[in-house]
């Protein structure tokens, strides 16, 4: 439930919650749902409920046991602001992140309305980064809600990138990750969509991270964009990082 991660923009994952439900086009081919079903079939006790939202209270304090500082993606198998997760549980997760201040925590959500509703009641130290997924123009409003949070680092995950984002609102954003969809039934990403997003970020001085082209075999497709690897991190990363 908490392992070294192969996700290019983080180092580890921590899943005090598993399971989710679909709310937008980016969820159609959810990798977490596929993995949860596989783990359920294998008899993994953490996935006895399949992909239904399940709280793992025994894992809430786990990062406190990790002595080596890490960059940690929170709930890679769920969404911390899912409506079925009680506020008290969310608060407990945030309290762990506050106390484990030798780590950086990356929280990513598609549920921007609940995020902005709860944000004033949650602590926001420097080591908690907040992000929203923006897969197409239809959900661009998630960025406007993200800006209203007190998070010191605000980031966008444009993955899977399903359309061009020609008027991307970069102001108030610290980091943009982009990538194509991967796995069975992956919807193709036009190269110009990624280029446009990169160019807008460069013009605005926003660090850009290109994660992958995607497709059925994402390893074969790689992650080189116009002859280079884009691994930029937030400009303030070195100021707040403890490692």
Image: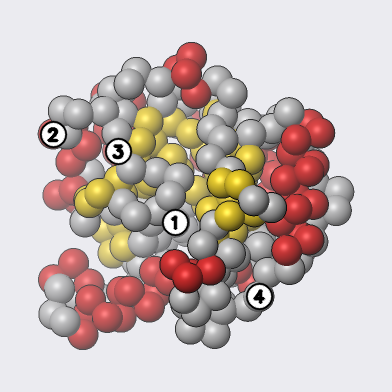
Residue 14 in sight in this render: no
Please name the residue shown 22% across and 72% down the image.
47
Which callout, 1 or 3, points to the residue nearer the camera?
A: 1
- x then y, percent, for residue 21: 47, 71
Which of pointers 2 and 1 lies earlier in the amino acid sequence?
2
Give the SS element for disc 4: loop
Q: Quadrant of the N terminus?
A: bottom left
In the image, 114 versus 22, the foreground residue is: 22
Circle on res. 188: 4
Image color mode: secondary structure
* Observer-nearest of 38 and 205: 205
- Quickly name the residue at label 2: 65
Q: Quadrant of residue 232?
A: top right
Of residues 27 and 207, which is closer to you in this image? 207
Dot 4 crowding, Cα within 10 Å, few <14, some 14–19, many 20+: some
Query: Is residue 34 left or right of 149 when viewed as pictured?
Result: left
* Quadrant (top left, top right, bottom left, bottom right) of the C terminus: top left
Label whose residue precedes the other's in the sequence (3 or 4): 3
Crowd tier of the residue under label 2, counting other residues whose Cα lies within 10 Å: few below 14, some 14–19, many 20 or above: few
**Residue located 54% across and 33% down the image:** 233
On the image, the x and y values in percent for residue 125 come to 43, 21
Residue for badge 1: 79
The location of residue 144, given as percent across then percent down, is 73, 41
What is the C-alpha distance between the residues marked 4 and 1? 24 Å
Give the structural element (helix, strand or loop) at label 3: helix
Tag 3 residue:
92
Judging depth in this view, the residue of 58 and 105 nearest the camera is 105
Instruction: Write down the quadrant of residue 49 in the picture.
Output: bottom left
Query: Secondary structure beneath disc 2?
Result: helix
Query: For the residues carrying marks 4 and 1, which lies nearer the camera in this image?
Result: 4
Q: In whole angstroms, how far apart are the C-alphas of marks 3 and 4?
A: 39 Å
How many marks the image carries: the answer is: 4
């Amino acid at each position: 439930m908490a392992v070294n991660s192969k996700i290019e923009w983080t180092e580890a994952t921590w899943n005090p919650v598993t399971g989710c439900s679909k709310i937008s086009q980016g969820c159609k081919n959810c990798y977490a749902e596929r993995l949860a079903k596989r783990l359920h079939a294998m008899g993994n006790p953490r996935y006895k409920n399949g992909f239904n939202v399940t709280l793992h209270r025994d894992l809430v304090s786990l990062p406190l046991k990790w002595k080596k500082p890490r960059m940690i993606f929170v709930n890679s198998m769920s969404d911390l602001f899912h409506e079925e997760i009680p506020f008290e549980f969310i608060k407990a997760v945030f309290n762990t992140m506050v106390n484990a201040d030798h780590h950086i925590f990356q929280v990513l959500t598609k549920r921007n309305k609940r995020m902005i509703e709860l944000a004033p009641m949650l602590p926001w130290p420097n080591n908690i980064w907040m992000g929203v997924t923006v897969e197409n123009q239809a959900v661009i409003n998630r960025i406007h809600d993200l800006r209203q949070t007190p998070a010191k680092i605000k980031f966008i995950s444009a993955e899977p990138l399903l359309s061009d984002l020609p008027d991307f609102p970069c102001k108030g954003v610290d980091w943009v990750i982009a990538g194509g969809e991967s796995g069975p039934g992956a919807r193709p990403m036009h190269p110009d969509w990624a280029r446009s997003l990169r160019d807008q970020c460069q013009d605005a001085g926003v660090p850009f991270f290109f994660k992958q082209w995607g497709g059925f075999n994402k390893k074969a497709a790689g992650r080189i964009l116009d002859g280079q690897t884009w691994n930029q991190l937030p400009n303030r990363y070195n100021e707040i990082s403890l490692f």
